[in-house]
Amino acid sequence: MNGYKVFAPATVSNLACGFDLIGFPIHGPGDEIIANRSDTPGVQIISITGAKGKLPLETEKNTAGVAAMAVLKHLGREDFGATFEIRKKMPIGSGMGSSAASAVAGAVAINALLGNPLTKRELLPFASAGEQIASGGSIHLDNVAPCLMGGFVFNCNNDTFDVVRLLAPKGLHCALVFPHLTILTAEARSILSPNVPLKKHVEQSANLGGLIVGLYRGDLDLISRSLKDVIIEPQRSKLITGFDEVQSAALAQGALGCSISGAGPSVFALCQSSIIAEACAQAMQQAFEKKGINSNAYVSTINMEGAKVY
């Protein structure tokens, strides 16, 4: 075929206790790329919609373009030509993995045009290269890997792209609320203290271990006890107006846990059923509304497929 449509989903990362280490994708919002063969070598981005002019058309400055070119370079196919139409179907600077979704879509799209010589896992370094330009030059796999592969994904090692797809109990739902605030990843990282008290480190490590064990065992009580962030959330929550009230509203509706999605300002609640997730989403939106903040809500099962080619 000469053309494909690729969709890369939004993601929830950190999951309270797993800063930079764990994430999962949802259904609904994401990024879409229409990719077609071209006689001109390289990748040309011919249009971007839904970004309100915030993203560059220059290939070397665009996360999708950088990821696609990295694939071509790796395969020795820099003579290959493609055009991308990028359709942003999720907000930028939302804590929903916007830049990661673009990068993943770019890598998957060029791979599809080439006849899929690489597996999804093999595409991870190249998608990460694209996302890297949006995150200040550092590599973080907690959005890219789940967006690409689907399901809960744990990052063992950034340098070697060593990631593990985790088991998870069926029926888990996510309520994700995006308040109409903007927090860029670089800004959210700049306020973090480089020093972590030993007691907090031990507590956070225990929570992350408990979350992983809870996912494997399907132990909802253990998952709930473990979805607590004692290091990052206390520092970042001040950037999100009404966060404490939103978190309390979700927990009051029966959420297993509630915290900041990625760098924020989106807030997620992990829930054991769709009914609870819908109630949480409504309560979280109402809490933001009381602070004078409009928001969008998404209720979804865990997306087990990740990036998809049509």
Image (cartoon, helix red, strand yellow):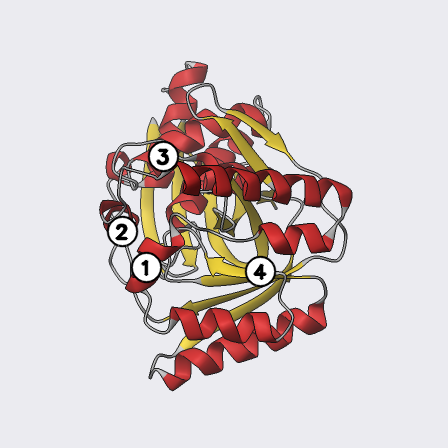
Compare marks 2 and 3 and give the one earlier in the sequence. Answer: 2
Q: Amino acid at mark 1?
A: Ala
Q: Are marks 2 and 3 in contact (CB under 8 Å)?
A: no
Q: Amino acid at mark 4?
A: Gly
Name the residue located 42 percent from the left edge and 43 percent from the top edge: 200
User: x and y percent of residue 24 in the render?
Assistant: 57, 47
Compare marks 1 and 4 and give the one earlier in the sequence. Answer: 1
Compare marks 4 and 2 and give the one earlier in the sequence. Answer: 2
Neighbor class of circle 1 (other Cα within 10 Å; few <14, some 14-19, many 20+) is: some
Q: Are marks 4 and 3 in contact (CB under 8 Å)?
A: no
Compare marks 1 and 3 and give the one earlier in the sequence. Answer: 1
Tell me the mark number nearer the camera, choosing from 1 and 3. 3
Residue to which mark 4 is pinned: 257
Name above or below for residue 41 compared with residue 291: above
Residue to which mark 1 is pinned: 51
User: x and y percent of residue 292 in the render?
Assistant: 33, 84
Q: Secondary structure at mark 3?
A: helix
Q: Are marks 1 and 2 in contact (CB under 8 Å)?
A: yes
Residue to which mark 3 is pinned: 130
Q: Secondary structure at mark 2?
A: loop
